[in-house]
Image (tube, grey):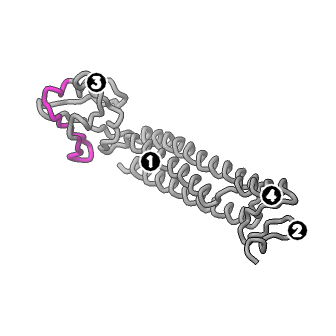
Amino acid sequence: MGHSAYHNHGILQKKPNFFCILLTNPYLCRKKIIIYKNMIDVKQTLNAAEERMQMAAMFLEEELSRVRAGRANVAILDGVRVESYGSKVPLNQVANISTPDARTIAIKPWDRKQIKDIEKAIMDSDVGITPENNGEIIRLGIPQPTEERRRDLVKQCNKICEKAKVEVRNVRGDIKEKLKKAIKDGLSEDNEKDAEAGLQKLHDKYIKKLDELMEAKNKEIMTV
């Protein structure tokens, strides 16, 4: 019957293609197309949620690495910027940084002439340790914190961890609300429930990760 086989009383019936042209009711067709256009991509939405939760975990890991717990950790120098040829650059761009033992950070400048600049940068930072040098290598002696100081550090870390947990919970809340609204745009309730279950699994996974990071840091702080 050719092309006319797809016509029936003014309706173009080209199945199974959803984007049919309803000649008798073009408004209805437009409404359906708009619903599909606005339909939430559940997989993409959950991936975006996980990315945000990962950022919270990365934030916690980075912040905890900066907390000096009595052991030598080069991360405490991440914020140090050294004057070099007219601009300020990260310390690790002008020197080799190592930890020869648990209580010492050693800094060997690529150019010995920069020793004074490096020492000044450390003194001007919030590292809080006075550097010493032998003309070639700068050393930072990491003081062993008192019991009281260790407990203060644990409290400080717990506050940072809580901030990260709040972010993970906020992500869950934001996405949960987005999924609820998506039902109005055509997402089935079953799919919404499945997506919400997946979201909860992501939440639990990252809360557990944050707890593990915190537990490891507490152990590091309290180990004499």
Q: Nearer the viewer, residue 141 or 3?
A: 3
- Counting from the top left corner in percent of width and height, residue 9 is at 88, 68
Mark 1: amino acid: Glu
Mark 1: few/some/many CA within 10 Å (<14, 14-19, 20+): some
**From the image, which quarter does the N terminus lie in?**
bottom right
User: What separation in Å lies between label 3 and label 2 (alpha carbons)?
Assistant: 77 Å
Q: Secondary structure at mark 4?
A: helix
Q: Secondary structure at mark 1?
A: helix
- Residue designated by label 1: 61
- Counting from the top left corner in percent of width and height, residue 121 is at 28, 26
Whichever of callouts 2 and 1 sits on the residue coming sooner in the sequence is: 2
Q: Secondary structure at mark 3?
A: strand
Whichever of callouts 4 and 2 sits on the residue coming sooner in the sequence is: 2
- The reply to whether the C-beta atoms of the residues labelled 3 and 2 are less than 8 Å apart is no
- Residue designated by label 3: 87
Whichever of callouts 3 and 4 sits on the residue coming sooner in the sequence is: 4
User: What separation in Å lies between label 1 and label 4 (alpha carbons)?
Assistant: 51 Å
Whichever of callouts 1 and 4 sits on the residue coming sooner in the sequence is: 4
Disc marking residue 147: none
Q: Residue at x 78, y 71 (%)?
A: 4
Disc marking residue 29: 4
- The reply to whether the C-beta atoms of the residues labelled 4 and 2 are less than 8 Å apart is no
